Image: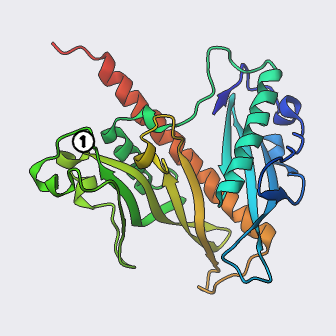
Amino acid sequence: MLELDSDKHTLQSLIGKPDAIQLQNVHYKLLNDPKFQIREAGKAIVFDYKIEKANRSRDWSNHNTVHNGAILIRQKGAKIHITSQFTTKEVKEYNDRLVKEIEKKFKASQHLRKDNPILRITSGDFSNLERIKFLISFTDGSSDGLLKFEKIPYVSFGPDRSKQLPEEMKWMQDRVHALMIRGEKKTSLHDLEFISKIEYQNFVILESVDANFVMEHKGRKLYCSLDFGFHKYLKSLDASTEFEVHITNLSVYDHGGKKVSLSNKEQREMEFLILDKFDNIKLENYERIISEKQAGENSIVV
């Protein structure tokens, strides 16, 4: 997130249309320059593109696969939110490059607040307890009730290797690095005792969550799976690991319960709709947890 010195600016006047970034020494190629789309009366801009990469797991006659990538920039008052959408590490890599160029353009406009650095949500912003609280807070859904949580079928977590574990967790000590648990079809794992019980939370690192949500839009029901968290944090314990989210599955049904076949354009529109709503939840929950943390640090015990 970035913060401007005023809410009077327009996104297009600040950043214009970023040029496509030339790729060198990579094993994928950009199929088209990012499409520049202005939305919401200039309050949102989307850069949508495709890459092609080799896929050795496919049939010998077709070694290439195509993957979508996108950057969504939305202005809310003086605040700028940038959402990166990707499904492969190659798309993430290109998105990271594109975001850096976009941030440079914002800085060059000289309208960013000088006392506000660019906000990135990282694993180091939280203690283990706060990180669990943050990731599980998405189960409340959006505050307006439009994006509703259904269940968590998959979690990735592990013991905090810097601590002596309580008796009930001793079996993990020096034996378990990470646990990736997938529940049965009708099971939700957000009540898993090592994550939900306060007596264990200080000894557990919750890395990522795969959660199911449902959203209604124009008479249709959107069922989606979102994979979010601080991916690979358990392996690196790098405090700069950034929060990521991407859609792993999306199905749309009409008011009669019949599955709707979407065009590529409609698919992308639905994905942006969901990610925008999720982004609102992310920022609300992050700001609340950080405010509570700061209030606790500033409180005086008598």
Please state the horizontal and vertical placement of residue 169, each as a whole percent of the image. 17, 54
What is the secondary structure assignment of the residue under circle 1?
A: loop
**In this rendering, position of residue 225 left or right of residue 170:** right
Pick whichever, 228 or 268, lies toward us: 228
Pick whichever, 279 or 87, lies toward us: 87
**In this rendering, position of residue 278 left or right of residue 99:** left
Q: In which quarter of the image is the C terminus?
A: top left
Relative height, residue 116 to residue 59 (above, below) = above
Relative height, residue 56 to residue 101 (above, below) = below
Count of marks overlaid on the render = 1
Graded by Cα atoms within 10 Å as few (under 14), some (14 to 19) or many (20 or more), the crowding at tag 1 reads some
Relative height, residue 131 to residue 114 (above, below) = below
**In this rendering, position of residue 22 left or right of residue 290:** right
Residue at 66% x, 46% y is: 83
* Quarter assignment of residue 108: top right
Pick whichever, 50 or 119, lies toward us: 50
Q: In which quarter of the image is the N terminus?
A: top right
Residue at 69% x, 73% y is: 56
Which amino acid, by three-letter code, is at mark 1?
Asn
Please state the horizontal and vertical placement of residue 265, each as a whole percent of the image. 80, 67
The residue wearing badge 1 is 202
* Quarter assignment of residue 102: top right
Protein image colouring: rainbow
Residue at 27% x, 61% y is: 192
Relative height, residue 126 to residue 201 (above, below) = above
Please state the horizontal and vertical placement of residue 256, each as a whole percent of the image. 61, 86
Please state the horizontal and vertical placement of residue 62, each as a whole percent of the image. 79, 79
